[in-house]
Image (spheres, rainbow, N blue to C red):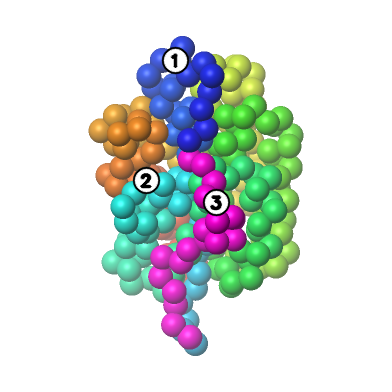
């Protein structure tokens, strides 16, 4: 968890949004050891990979079963609809856009049919300049497009509360629709919609979603991703 020296001054809802967006600490094993596959397609299978690339919201920090993280919930939805896709969870707790930029080439060694990008929240918590965050996200997207030009792209939007400064919060929120529009990506406007600030949907630390919270997060993503997969398969 990334902590702020002044978190005690933030109202409950804003505190939850701020800290939940931060999402954990990096593991000691290093970035390349933390990418995991929810379900690995069999050799010569027609199953296509959906790569979820993000921080601890993607990784499922604090959950007993990694498959309870929102990408794992989405795999269950995919299986129930019998769509030929396999989720690859490449989430790293505490990841920033700079960290993501440094490891994206390694992650892209596996085939990618759909790329879901969930990064930027930790940048916002650290007050990293908006341009730097946007440039890093664009670089990640550029690398995906260069290696897999036919891949479908989805961006998961995040927000920071006004205590970061109203101008910064507004500019940060605007990064995601701007990047999505520029790159013709599908956009989930706010990943934590319906979960941020709801105690019953967060773990005891008040920071990370419970399994129930992760299901709601998955629903937010599936609302955009589901129709995309159906259309691509059809």
Residue for point 39% across, 22% down? 13
* Alpha carbons under labels 1 and 2: distance apart: 23 Å
Q: Residue furthest front?
A: 28
Circle 3 — which element? Answer: loop
Rendering coords of residue 169 (x, y %): 59, 24
On residue 62, the disc is 2
Q: For mark 3, does the 10 Å Cα neighbourhood hold few (<14), some (14 to 19), or many (20 or more) residues?
A: few
Left-right relation of 148 to 208: right
Q: Main secondary structure of the magenta part?
A: loop
Residue for point 74% across, 34% down? 131
- Tell me: residue 15, above or below residue 137: above
Q: Which residue is mark 3?
A: 28
- Tell me: residue 76, above or below residue 177: below
Residue for point 66% across, 57% down? 103
Verify whether residue 33 appears in magenta.
Answer: yes
- Magenta stretch bounds: 24-43
Q: Residue furthest bottom?
A: 44
On residue 224, the disc is none
Residue 143: name its quadrant: bottom right
Q: Which residue is mark 1?
A: 8
Q: Residue furthest top?
A: 9
Left-right relation of 156 to 106: left
Verify whether residue 97 appears in magenta.
Answer: no
Circle 1 — which element? Answer: helix
Q: Identify the mark nearer the N-term, 1 or 2.
A: 1
């Amino acid at each position: 968890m990334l902590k702020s020296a002044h978190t005690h001054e933030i109202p409950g809802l804003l505190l939850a949004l701020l800290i939940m967006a931060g999402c954990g600490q990096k593991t000691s094993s290093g970035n390349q050891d933390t990418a995991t596959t929810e379900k690995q397609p069999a050799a010569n299978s027609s199953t296509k990979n959906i790569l979820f690339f993000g921080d601890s919201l993607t990784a499922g920090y604090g959950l007993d079963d990694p498959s309870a993280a929102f990408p794992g919930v989405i795999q269950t939805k995919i299986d129930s609809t019998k769509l030929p896709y396999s989720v690859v969870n490449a989430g790293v707790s505490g990841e920033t856009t700079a960290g993501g930029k440094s490891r994206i080439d390694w992650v892209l060694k596996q085939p990618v049919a759909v790329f879901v990008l969930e990064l930027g929240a930790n940048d916002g918590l650290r007050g990293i300049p908006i341009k730097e965050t946007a440039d890093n996200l664009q670089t990640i997207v550029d690398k995906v497009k260069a290696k897999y030009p036919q891949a479908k792209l989805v961006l998961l939007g995040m927000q920071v509360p006004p205590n970061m400064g109203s101008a910064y919060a507004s500019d940060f929120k605007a990064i995601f629709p701007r990047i999505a529009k520029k790159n013709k990506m599908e956009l989930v406007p706010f990943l934590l919609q319906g979960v941020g600030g709801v105690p019953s949907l967060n773990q005891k630390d008040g920071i990370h979603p419970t399994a129930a919270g992760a299901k709601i997060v998955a629903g937010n993503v599936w609302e955009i991703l589901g129709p995309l997969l159906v259309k691509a398969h059809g």
